[in-house]
Amino acid sequence: MGSRFYLVGETFDYDGREVLRSFVDPNTALDGQFDFPFKARLCEALFTPGGRLDGFAGWMQTNDTFYGERSLMSTFIGNHDIPRAIHFASRQITDCRQGSNTGNGWSMDYRQPTDAAPYERLGLAFAVMLTNPGVPLIYYGDEIGLAGGGDPDNRRSMPWSDSALNPAQIALRARVSTLSRIRAENPVVARGARTTLSSSQDTWVYRMSGCTGGRDVIVAINRADDGRMVTMPAGMYTDLMATGGATVMGGAVTLPPRSVLVWRAQ
């Protein structure tokens, strides 16, 4: 008796933030909703050829407090109502608002991509989701970029053996695992405040700060298909994405294609 629980709603609306917000009130209604507007704009920013991270950074700034100070929105990239995320990342599906329909749910057209680029783009989406506030939802299989069209094709059996996966799938799963560990060990990325340090069409560098006793975390993302240079704040950092947590220095850094850095201040 008297225990608190999280009550989340699902209002399938990519553009009606006001509609979603009308059901959110932690005192009397929902604690939050599945953030469909976040999903659409993250997809457009990272997966479409003309996507813009600077525009997405600005939109995120408006979204941080849109649903109320105590709301807990659930962020996601894929779910059971839409085609599998890997086909948005591969650009086979170009409409980031596409849902399930008879044309994509009962089709053999959605095969497992073999090249690395779609999985790396999907990894960037996970990086944004797992280094920002919210309650992240990972639909089973998206951590390996499982293929599938709309419902029911998005409910394929989970391949449990690595022998059934291609190298890009294994690399994506490792990236999601690392990002999940970073989130668990650094509460600032889930509960802190985000400050954009720089942004362009292809890059976004932001600082997560504000948790008592926690060190700031800097995230840098490059969505481009070639390297991009960004400037990290001066100081010494621990590279949280590197095995063993190497010490690195701030300054000019070249981000490889479709890559993310996550650094914690020392």
Image: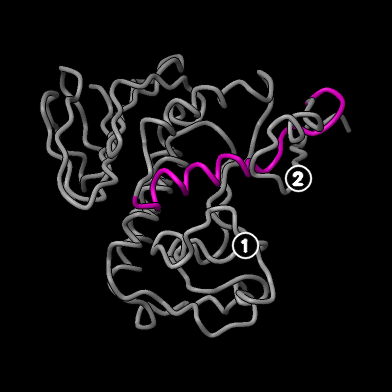
Q: Earlier in the sequence, mark 2 or mark 1?
A: 2
Label 1, on which residue?
82
Local packing at callout 2 (Cα closer than 10 Å; few below 14, some 14-19, many 20+) is some
Q: Quadrant of residue 64?
A: top right
Instruction: Give the tally of numbered discs.
Output: 2
Q: Nearer the viewer, residue 92 or 111?
A: 92
Q: Disc 1 residue type?
A: Ile
Q: Disc 2 residue type?
A: Thr
Q: Is residue 239 left or right of residue 75?
A: left
Q: Is residue 111 magenta?
A: no
Q: Is residue 44 magenta?
A: yes
Please determine whether, in this image, residue 225 is positioned above or below residue 264.
below
Image position, residue 194 (x, y; %): 43, 22
Taking the view exactly as shown, the residue that stands out farthest to the front is 50
Image position, residue 255 (x, y; %): 17, 41
Spatial CA span between label 2 and label 1? 14 Å
> Which contiguous range is marked in magenta?
26-49
Q: Is residue 34 left or right of residue 2?
A: left
Label 2, on which residue?
11
Q: Residue at x 64, y 35 (%)?
A: 73
Q: Quadrant of residue 161?
A: bottom left
Q: Residue at x 47, y 59 (%)?
A: 94
Q: Is residue 42 left or right of residue 29?
A: left
Q: How is the image coloured?
A: one colour
